[in-house]
Each structure stands twice: as structure tokens, then as C-alpha cells.
Amino acid sequence: MRISDIFRRHSLDQTTAKNSAQQAKDERESSNSSAIASNSDDRVSISPMARQFAQISKIVAEDEEKQSSRVEDLKRKIAAGEYSVSSSDVANSILSFAKDENA
């Protein structure tokens, strides 16, 4: 599972919860027969955790853009026959992966 999937799932869960809460609030307000004048001093504050979440989401989105750009570049090189892989790099990568799997 990718980190971005976790953030998207968390964001989706939060959005669903907020929508449910808002719907319940709207139903309560609509069922209330007496009209109350609203105060124009409404304020919104964002928690530090929400700010951190926004920053992390931005970083992850930028990383995904870089990754997709790199993938497109590799596809272009492969299609043009310009991409070559060092056999020693492949062997070292396989050995490293095998070591990590057995650890």
C-alpha cells in the first residue's frame, strides 16, 4: 500500500464523516420551525494536524508528479531503444531484495 493511498483513504473517511455530520445538522436546522438570525462573526480555524496533513498531501502529490514524469521518460527511452540497464546493477538489486526478504 502506498502512502498516498493511506492519505487519500483518510481524507475520504474524513470527508464522509463531515458530510454525514453536515447532513444531520442540516436536517436538524430544517426541522426547526423557528428562524433564528445568524451572527456574522463566524470563524473557521484549522488544527495543526490538519495543516500537517495538507503539507504532507502536497508533498505526496508533487512526488507523484515527479514519478509519473520519470515513468513517461523511461517509456519514451524504451520505445526509442535508448534505454539500457547495467547487468551488474540488476544483479545487485536482486541480491539486495533477497537479503531484505530474508531479514
Image (tube, helix red, strand yellow):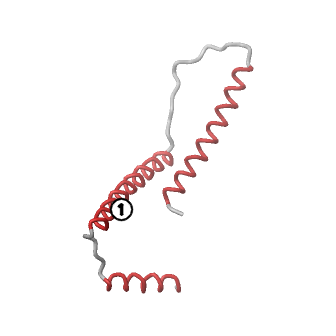
Quarter-wise, where is residue 35 in the image?
top right
Residue in the image at 48% along x and 46% along y? 48
Q: Position of residue 85 (x, y in %)?
A: 30, 77
Frontmost residue, 92 versus 81: 81
Q: Residue furthest front?
A: 80
Vertical comparison of 71 with 54: above or below: below
Q: Position of residue 18 (x, y in %)?
A: 61, 38
Residue in the image at 67% along x and 31% along y? 23
Residue in the image at 53% along x and 24% along y? 42
Quarter-wise, where is residue 19 in the image?
top right
Frontmost residue, 92 versus 3: 92
User: Position of 5 compared to 76: left or right?
Assistant: right
User: Position of 57 compared to 6: left or right?
Assistant: left
Quarter-wise, where is residue 6 in the image?
bottom right
Frontmost residue, 89 versus 84: 84
User: Position of 10 compared to 61: left or right?
Assistant: right
User: Position of 27 compared to 83: left or right?
Assistant: right
User: How many labels sit on residues?
Assistant: 1
Residue at the disc numbered 1:
71
Frontmost residue, 85 versus 39: 85
User: Does dot 1 land on a helix, a strand or a loop?
Assistant: helix
Q: Position of residue 21 (x, y in %)?
A: 66, 35
Q: Position of residue 2 (x, y in %)?
A: 50, 62
The local crowd at label 1, few if under 14, some if 14 to 19, many if 20 or more residues have their Cα within 10 Å, is few
